[in-house]
Amino acid sequence: MRHVLNITDLSVSEIDSLIATAMDIIGNREKYQDICRRKKLATLFFEPSTRTRLSFEAAMLELGGSVIGFSSASSSSSSKGESVSDTVKVVSYYADIIAMRHPKEGAPVAASAVSGVPIINAGDGGHNHPTQTLADLLTIHREKGRFNDLTVGFCGDLKFGRTVHSLVSALSRYCGINLVFISPDELKIPQYIITDIVNKNHMPYIETRDMESVMPTLDILYMTRVQGERFFNEADYVRLKDYYILTPDKLAAAKPDMCVMHPLPRVNEISRTIDSDPRACYFKQVENGKYMRMALIMMLLGLTPEI
Amino acid sequence: MVVDKIENGIVLDHIKAGNAMALYRYLNLDELDCSVAIIKNVKSRKMGKKDIIKIDSMIDINLDVLGYFDENITVNIIRGGERAEKKHLSLPREIVNIVKCKNPRCITSTEQELDHIFRLTDPQRRVYRCAYCDSAGGNAGGNV
């Protein structure tokens, strides 16, 4: 049984293929509108989510399939003490494919061990979020036209920012990627990402607290939200939540074709006045995410459109 | 000092000096009814000093546990008072329920029935990571 729990569960050629499918979906929507007819996607969201859950559901509906599931742990049997493994085992008898989000890291790994249908990790705590990375990669492909020779800055909560960890993993398989990690000391990129991914793949990187000093060097600036739900201490969250705020003043020093990305939701870290700047790509990521999830669902169900 | 040789059993040799008691606990040897000798600070040409554990019974030893603890330990199987077999260890690729994940955000912290699985991700640095959350389980050897 094929599952996608981590972005590295997909080979570079499979990601290329998913991007090609997504680009074809964008140009030929009607070709895909019935491809998942009579197939059911279960969205098991043990943690609140707006865009990821709706993106999966919209993706399946646009493929002609159906959706079942729940949107919070309180509306599932986990509120009665049922284990993730049991919930997933039961749902795998009802659905053809499962997208799950869980606040605990590694929950999709536990789920995949018992599931009879493909599991897609739709985010597990501060760990991984591979389909956001697919959205990010399609956005980079559409905006920059390449995955090589890019200087990519990650800014904000790099410790718990699962989208950052997944995107660094994905980019580690391309050449000429320079990484710039911008964060307060308390939210630095985890050491295992540096040793197991960055150093292992000989990726040049710098760590800094100063966003403005590195701004002119960046091809992509990937902003992240400081996530209150990941802190055990409220005081730490309050102290760090507005550490970085991207404003037009700061963006003035950036390259004219730099991409500002953000997995959303944002709070204060990107000023609303930047939304109209052509470099703002974060709403494009939302759209691209749906197309990549459509492509991924088709791939995991072994479905291809009739030509 | 003289410790009698054993007729049938196991001798764990080349244990890093000072680690024998930890290994004794790690392998649950206190639960055995047979004689178990812990010999500390034995002179060794190769190691300077070493510890040895002699077990006067043919028990099942979990070689993965032993390899994770210290892959330099040698396992001598004794039959009829003679060494019948000498086993060299290696770092196991995966260890199950030997160490627990300490990450409070890991799914294993709330789902008690899950096995605690760690995989060797960096043999040179002897680093094991949780199969669920990727947290480091510490370096193998001396982390018990």
Image (cartoon, coloured by chain):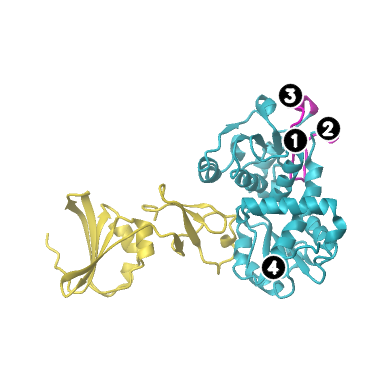
Chain colours: A cyan, B yellow
How crowded pointer 2 is (Cα within 10 Å; few <14, some 14-19, many 20+) is rated as few
The chain under label 3 reads A
The chain under label 2 reads A
**Nearest to viewer (mark 4 / mark 3):** 3
> In the visual, does B1 lie left or right of A271?
left
Image height of A178 relative to A57, above or below: above
- Type of the residue with mark 4: Ser
- Residue at 79% of width from left, 39% of height from top? A281
Q: Identify the residue position indicated by label 1 in the image.
A: A259
Secondary element type, mark 4: helix
- Type of the residue with mark 3: Ala
Assign the magenta stretch its main secondary structure. Answer: loop
Q: Identify the residue position indicated by label 3 in the image.
A: A253
User: Which residue is at the far front?
Assistant: A307
Residue range (magenta): A248-277
Q: Identify the residue position indicated by label 4 in the image.
A: A78
Number of callouts: 4
Q: Identify the residue position indicated by label 2 in the image.
A: A277
- Type of the residue with mark 1: Cys
**Nearest to viewer (mark 3 / mark 1):** 1
Ranked by sequence position, the earlier of labels 1 and 2 is 1
On the question of residue A116 being in view, the answer is yes
The C terminus of chain A - image quarter: bottom right
- Type of the residue with mark 2: Asp
Q: How far apart, in angstroms, are the residues tagged by discs 2 and 4?
A: 44 Å
The magenta stretch spans residue A229: no
